Amino acid sequence: MSEANDDVRQQVVRAWRAVDAEKFPAFTDVWRRAEARHAGARRRYRRVAVAAVLMAAVFVALKLQAPSPNAVTYIEVAELLGSTSWTAPSDVLLPRHEFDIYQELPGLLESTRAEGGSLL
Amino acid sequence: MRDGDALDNNPHVSISALEAIHGQVYGWALSRCDFNRAAAEDLMQQAYVEVLSGNARFNNKSSLKTFVFGVVENLARSRFRRVTSRLRLLREHAGSLDGAVVEAVLPDEGHSIWPAVKALPPRQRDIIELVFCRELTIEEASGVMGVSIGAGRVHYDRAKKALRVRLRETGVNEE
């Protein structure tokens, strides 16, 4: 049984030797290419990272510059006083009636004609 | 262990140790790629990149050879999955293919045991290659293949039996 195993093993090894006899690429060449590939990948990663950081910085800067709708704003008192005025609600009556009921008393209507025991 | 030429991202791996197993790694990569030399070289290069970058980290729990073989195996599997999905897409979008998209180039069909080895199921062929030709133990080979030791032993025994039967059938007994 063991001899049979050994025989199988030897024959497989012999057959595989044909595969292994293939000239394989030199280690230094493969290694150099692997290093170049690794360096290229690292460069690409670094570029992407730098671009991401820059984009984040630009985003934050823009965000800081734009006023927030909920931001607290301060009121300048002098400016406020200069820009506001107050009018009485009854002022709307003035152009229509063209008199100032507070200053000019309207003349009272008088009737001298009697009608049924009372003045009209 | 930290040799003078140890890698920065993999302190337990030295360039000289990798160089010492380079030929065997190439052989293993070759059989992972249906003996396509260009694909094997690319696969091996990618495995070295994984080791260089530290994506595949060696922690001295196994031999370096087992570790690098495992990296090659994993990369080959993920590449196979990618190729399979691309082929599926091609089939879906290109209608019918003439079947010549992936061509296996076998090295030496002249040896009479080769057809018997080729006829083995993939797992059995892998463990036979790892144990017989790459001189790994069954435990190490199981680790490379990502199967339990018990499953590895079963594959190994079945492969040996199948090879013996085929050899007997074909009367192969070369010196």
Image (spheres, coloured by chain):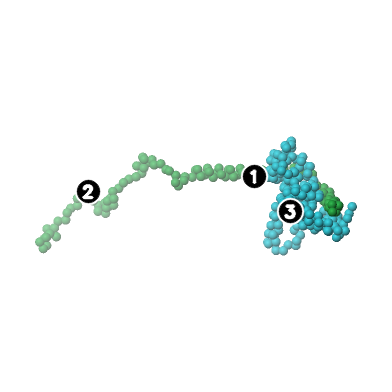
At 73% from the left and 37% from the top, the residue drawn is: B1
Q: Secondary structure at mark 2?
A: loop
Residue of label 1: A45
Vertical arrangement, residue B168 with respect to residue B140, above or below: below
Q: Separation of disc 1 and disc 3 at Cα? A: 40 Å
Residue that extends furthest to the front in the rendered view of this protein: A1
| Disc 2 to disc 1, C-alpha distance | 83 Å
Is A110 left, or right, of B32 in this rendering?
Answer: left
Where residue A64 appears, as percent x and y from the top left, is: 50, 43
Q: Rounded to the nearest whole Å, what is the CA distance between mark 2 and mark 3?
A: 111 Å
* Same-chain check, marks 1 and 3: no
Q: Amino acid at mark 2?
A: Tyr
| Dots 1, 3 in contact, CB < 8 A | no
Q: Is residue A38 visible?
A: no
Chain B color in figure: cyan
Q: Which residue is mark 2?
A: A102
Q: Of residues B57 and B143, which is closer to you in this image?
A: B143
Q: Nearer the viewer, residue A73 or A24?
A: A24
Q: Which mark is residue B151?
A: 3
Amino acid residing under circle 1: Tyr
